[in-house]
Amino acid sequence: MANIIDGVRYTKEHEWVKLEGDTSTEGITDYAQSELSDIVMVEPPAIGRKVKAGEAVGTIEAVKAVSDLFAGISGEVIEVNEKVVTDPAIINKDPYGEGWLYKIKVVDPKEYDTLLTPDQYKELISQS
């Protein structure tokens, strides 16, 4: 069973979003990293890029698949986790901690409330 943590919200595309003030930290869920298996490359969005919630903003590549990364919330990318670009396997080990992908300066914090709660995300992946 995938690890689903409290204190964050989730997207239907298996990203997590943690909102702190007007900054969101985003990454892929434990479920997503386990489905992808061995992650070998991450191409995050560029710093300064303006993104919309639900928009494809980058890619993540595993030995067996390439998947798009989707923004969980709208805003401007203000930071990228260079550690995971250099060593993508960090995501497999710690998707909610050291394996975060990027940070966004949020335009509309109310978008956070439209994301899935941990219980709603559990329900979503139980149907997979």
Image: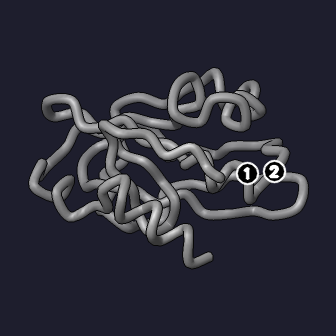
Q: Position of residue 93 (x, y in %)?
A: 71, 30
> Looking at the picture, does residue 97 appear above or below residue 22?
above
Q: Which residue is mark 1?
A: 34
Q: Given the current orientation, which residue lies at the most extreme right position?
A: 63
What quarter of the picture does the C terminus occupy? bottom right
Q: Is residue 7 left or right of residue 70?
A: left
- SS under mark 2: loop
Q: Nearer the viewer, residue 108 or 110?
A: 110
Q: Is residue 21 left or right of residue 9?
A: left
Q: Nearer the viewer, residue 90 or 81?
A: 90
Q: Kindly indicate the quadrant of the structure image that contains residue 94.
A: top right
Q: Position of residue 37 (x, y in %)?
A: 81, 50
Q: Kindly indicate the quadrant of the structure image that contains residue 82.
A: top right
Identified by mark 1, the residue type is Ser
Identified by mark 2, the residue type is Ser
> Looking at the picture, does residue 89 appear above or below residue 11?
above
